[in-house]
Image: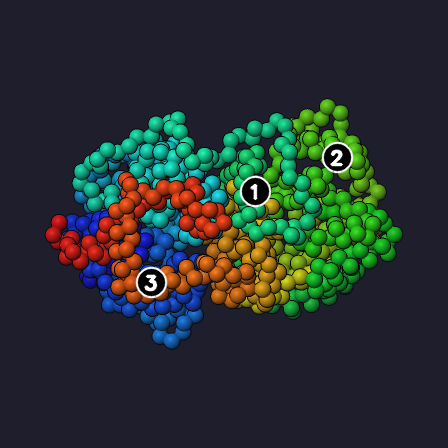
Amino acid sequence: MRLALFITCFNDTLFPETGASVVRVLRRLGHEVEFPYDQVCCGQMHFNSGYRRDAVPLVRSFVEAFEGYDAVIVPSGSCTAMVREYHATVARTAGGTLPEGVARVAPKVYELSEFLVDVLGVTDVGAYFPHSVAYHPTCHSLRMLRVGDRPTRLLRAVRGLTLVDLPRADECCGFGGTFAVKNAPTSVAMGGDKVTAALESGAQVLCAGDNSCLTHIGGLISRQHAGIRMLHLADILARTDALPDVPVYRPGLPDSSGLVVGHAPGTGGDTMTAAVHREPTFVGMPPFPEAAEAELANPVQRANLRAATHTIRAKRDAVVAELPDWELLRRAGEAIKDDVLARLPGLLERLEAAVRAAGGVVHWARDAAEANTIVVDIARAKGVDEVVKVKSMATEEIELNNALAAAGIHAWETDLAQLIVQLGDDLPSHIVVPAIHRNRAQIREIFVREMGRVGRPAPERLSDEPTALAAAARLHLRQKFLRAKVAVSGANFAIADTGTVCVVESEGNGRMCLTLPETLITVLGVEKLLPTWGDLEVFLQLLPRSATGERMNPYTSMWTGVTPGDGPREFHLILLDNGRSDVLSDPVGRQALRCIRCAACLNVCPVYERTGGHAYGSVYPGPIGAILTPQLRGIARHPVDAQTASLPFASTLCGACFDACPVRIDIPEVLVRLRAQVVDGGRGPHDRAEDAGMKTLRWTFEKPWRIGFAQHVAGVGAHFVRHGVIGRVPLPKRVSGPVGAWFADRDAPAPPAESFRTWYKRTEGGREL
């Protein structure tokens, strides 16, 4: 078997010892591995950053370098995933014979632990390492390659090694390539939590299959003087002796950087902290990095988000585990939604005919302005100055409340969380739980202060117990329910065959709005269709489990048109486009329209958990918002503002969102496509410095001699670095760019005196050792 080592540009330059370790392990097992000197970079950094065209020559070079080998071993999960999952995408951009070349080479590329366990069939590689080790499963290894327990099986077979559990091991460390500098404060917050977990484990060594993640975590640990060693899996498997001077973490060491690592302190919050006043609109909010940095400074909010998302996540995992066919249900939901999108015009016409046949009125709205006008005109025709509302993402999207207010009509939110947001003059921060960023003490203070200004006051001596708060909301809303003549709702689903509309909820306020008023207006995104009643069965299993961790929703309301003597006398259905046709036209981006608004992706997203929803500057926060909002705002057709253009970059691409999504939306795939539209398509504000840097790197990576020259220069410079670590870089913030963003809170390893390719050539592939 002819084997090749793809060292990766990162390891080649900064961690040549890892490549040497791979050579030693394979030779110990009786296998020689070749190092093709014309190998360069896999193109991951360019591809993931939106420079798809600049990745083309790098992918072509990869194919040329590794054509003809039986297997290519890679000591990096992320680079392996790039080759296997995304080289084909880059190749299609180039055309010609490149797609065929990728198809021949990519299936032969293996992450190190995959190759050892699956191809060679070994777990004991003859290593000895008498230290305690915690293993960090990097995101691409965990979720794209599905390496599972292969690395830990290898570690357990190492003599002398004690493998300890890493708390919250599957959470992203926050590196994410250029995310670490584009969104440095968020990256540092995520890395700080990983540092806390590593120290809690009590391990002497933190191990991973990617040195990039270890550089990020290790940079924080170095700045903290915390004393835990970072080692690649290969470096442990190659050992046959103890490490010299392995440090042991001692609690209470000073934090020299002033960085607060780890998750936010406890709720701290028996009192409400002063919040920055927000106008009730997302218009004009800053780009994500700036907004996120401001939100990170709120420790109470961070604690609220962490507690709430982890609670919902645990409930979801428990009820999902009860269903042996959960993955089949996900695939069924995906297939049904894709069928709807493929036949959408015809299904919409079928729905319109069915609703009209049942006595309803159907309106078509091209955009938010048309939809708002329709609602306002209906309310005015009924002579009302107030409406009650069921929680609705579509009406939030079109900012209906503001349109009604401009017309002199009060819109009363009746969902408990939406009521909290409205009374607090706040903005929703979660799709299912809009007030997730508030704790009980804050909610009580809002009720006491605000309820009396718009209706029945909060009870005297109101406590912050959930039952007391819910009772106060119930009393406050009851009079609004009883006197309302017009109600406005959204909808979770609509059945094209029968014209039936469905709303699911947990509190009963929706049922009150849908039955008591004389006129009901429903604003429905055109993608919310299902063809038949049989299709609804799938989604009534998927949605409650994914959204709230329940087996079924407490209230599932359905109605078909108007029924004399039962419920509203008039029913108006507004079919809302508002950019959805543009989303539908994108063969990759259209999968965002499968979304059933369950927010499962928010609850597992490490970025959302730390920044909250307001940082996204949209009613749709989190991972789904990062792909849906830019498309609804027309990123495929014309340039967008800086805030919109920043959203596709508000992710480490860790992939947790895809695993959680009940309809299998591949959010990372859409994110990298949108990044390419921002950069290569010129649809967002251009960072000329970044552009120049990326093109310089591409030029360097295209030729091995250029890489070698750059590594030589870096190695010479490393002689002037003390202790092999680069610490603070004293640059003014306005000119520091990515260098300053990294070194503000993290150290970095200095480049070694020689790269791996230099070592390999000097030692004839390690034979001199």
Q: Which residue is mark 1?
A: 294
Left or right, 334 with respect to 200, comes to right
Query: Which of the two labelled residues, at mark 2 and mark 3, occupies the earlier sequence position?
Result: 2
| Residue ranking furthest to the right | 383
Looking at the image, the residue that sits furthest to the top is: 461
Residue at the spot x=45%, y=58% of the render? Answer: 690
- Say which residue label 3 marks: 700
Q: CA distance from mark 1 to mark 3?
A: 37 Å
Does residue 761 lie above or below 431 as drawn?
Answer: below
Residue in the image at 29% along x and 44% along y: 721
**Left or right for 758, reference 650:** left
Q: Earlier in the sequence, mark 1 or mark 2?
A: 1
**Would you call the spot at circle 1 few (<14 residues within 10 Å), some (14-19), or many (20 or more)?**
some
Q: Residue type at mark 1?
A: Ala
| Within-10-Å neighbours for mark 2: few <14, some 14–19, many 20+ | some
**Amino acid type, label 2:** Glu
